[in-house]
Structure formats: C-alpha cells, structure tokens
Image: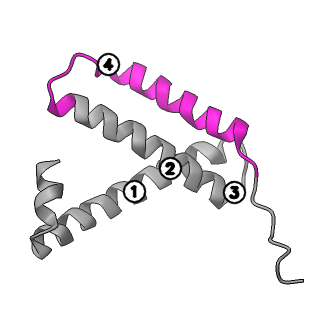
Amino acid sequence: HELIALAGRDPDLAHAIEAVAERFEALQRALITQWQQTIDATPDSELIDAQAFTVSRFVAGVMNDFVRNSDTTHSVEHLDSTIQAILQGVRGSYRPKTPSRRGR
C-alpha cells in the first residue's frame, strides 16, 4: 500500500506499478478464460470481466494478509478451491447486459 500511495507523487513508480498490474490482470484473465473454456467453448467476455474483477479483489486481500504475515492465508489447494467457488458463484449469478433502448 505504501508504494501505491507514493506512486501518486512519483510518475516513474506509478508507471512501473501500472505495468505490473496490467500484466497481472492479463494473466488472471487468461487463466479465467482457460477455465471458462472447459465449460463453454466461446465464453462471454463480459462474464470473464466480472469474474476477473471479483477474483482480483480476493487476491488483493490474500496478498494483503501475506504482507501482514497473517495466518489467514491458507494452502494453495484451499486458495484454488476458493477461487473456483468465486468463479462459479459469479457465473451462476451473471446476467448479460441488455442493449439500452434509449436510442429509439
């Protein structure tokens, strides 16, 4: 959190943090897309966006626990199981956006 706060005053640091975040988000999307393709050959990109957003918030919490040396970070198997449950939960509650009728 300290580095992110400092990035507001340091453009080079901000750029480096943004580059790492973009790579991490791309990796998450690729993994989620791969998982979705085991269920649906052509997964909905908006669903993947929703799943990536939710998983990224969970991962941020896990990373925060790790940095604080918290005992709440569990085994790899438990984390994988939790992420799978998150993906399934988002998929189960996901509703595709319907086109707006304002233009009529």
Q: CA distance from mark 1 to mark 3?
A: 17 Å
Amino acid type, label 1: Glu
Amino acid type, label 4: His
Horizontal relation, residue 99 to residue 24: left or right: right
Q: Is residue 75 magenta?
A: yes
Q: CA distance from mark 3 to mark 2?
A: 12 Å
Q: Quadrant of residue 79?
A: top left
Q: Which mark is residue 44?
A: 3
Amino acid type, label 3: Asp
First in residue order: circle 1 vs circle 4 = 1
Vertical side of 31 occupied by 66: above or below: above
Q: Quadrant of the C terminus?
A: bottom right
First in residue order: circle 2 vs circle 4 = 2
* Residue marked by disc 2: 52
First in residue order: circle 3 vs circle 2 = 3
Q: Which mark is residue 74?
A: 4
The structure residue drawn at horizontal position 26% and vertical position 66%, both measured from the top left corner, is 18
